Amino acid sequence: MRLTLLCLALLLPAAVEARIPRDRAEVRAFRAENPCPSTGLRRGRCDGWQVDHVEPLCAGGADKRANLQWISTEDHRFKTYVDVRECRKQRRANTQP
């Protein structure tokens, strides 16, 4: 248990640092306009799908409906990995003298 917590503690600073406040009302509005691809429902679970920012928040993307899309859970996981990596590169490039 302690080893798991230690591993999480080593991983969390980067994840927490990347956290940007989200507007849940925009996500609700997006879902009202764009029902779940698998169930057709506008509320509740949407197994296998997640709402994603087309242009990541960390890259200056807006937390608005126009910047949201449905994406499969698998694709979202990979896209998030790439987005976070690219945002870190950009941040490093901006902080170098």
Image: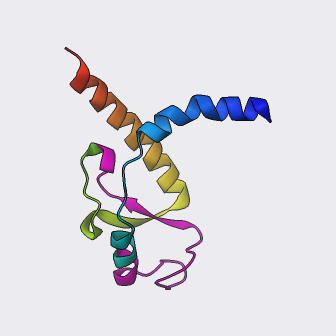
Q: Is residue 42 left or right of residue 87?
A: right
**Colouring rule applied to residues:** rainbow
Residue shown at 26% from the left, 53% from the top? 61
**Residue 85: x percent and y percent?**
40, 35
**Residue 1: x percent and y percent?**
80, 36
Secondary structure that dominates the magenta span: loop
| 46 magenta-colored | yes
Asked where in the image residue 38 lies, by quadrant, the reply is bottom right
**Residue 33: x percent and y percent?**
34, 82
**Residue 22: x percent and y percent?**
37, 59
Nearest the camera: 84 or 11? 11
- Is the C terminus in the top left, top right, bottom left or bottom right quadrant? top left
Stretch in magenta? 30-58
Nearest the camera: 15 or 69? 15
Residue occupying the far left of the picture: 97
Residue occupying the far right of the picture: 1
Residue occupying the far bottom of the picture: 41
Residue shown at 49% from the left, 55% from the top? 75
Examine the rendered structure and indicate whether residue 74 appears above or below residue 66: above
| 82 magenta-colored | no
Numbered-mark total: 0
Q: Is residue 9 left or right of residue 64?
A: right
Residue shown at 33% from the left, 65% from the top? 68
Examine the rendered structure and indicate whether residue 93 appears above or below residue 83: above
Asked where in the image residue 52 lies, by quadrant, the reply is bottom left
Residue shown at 55% from the left, 55% from the top? 74
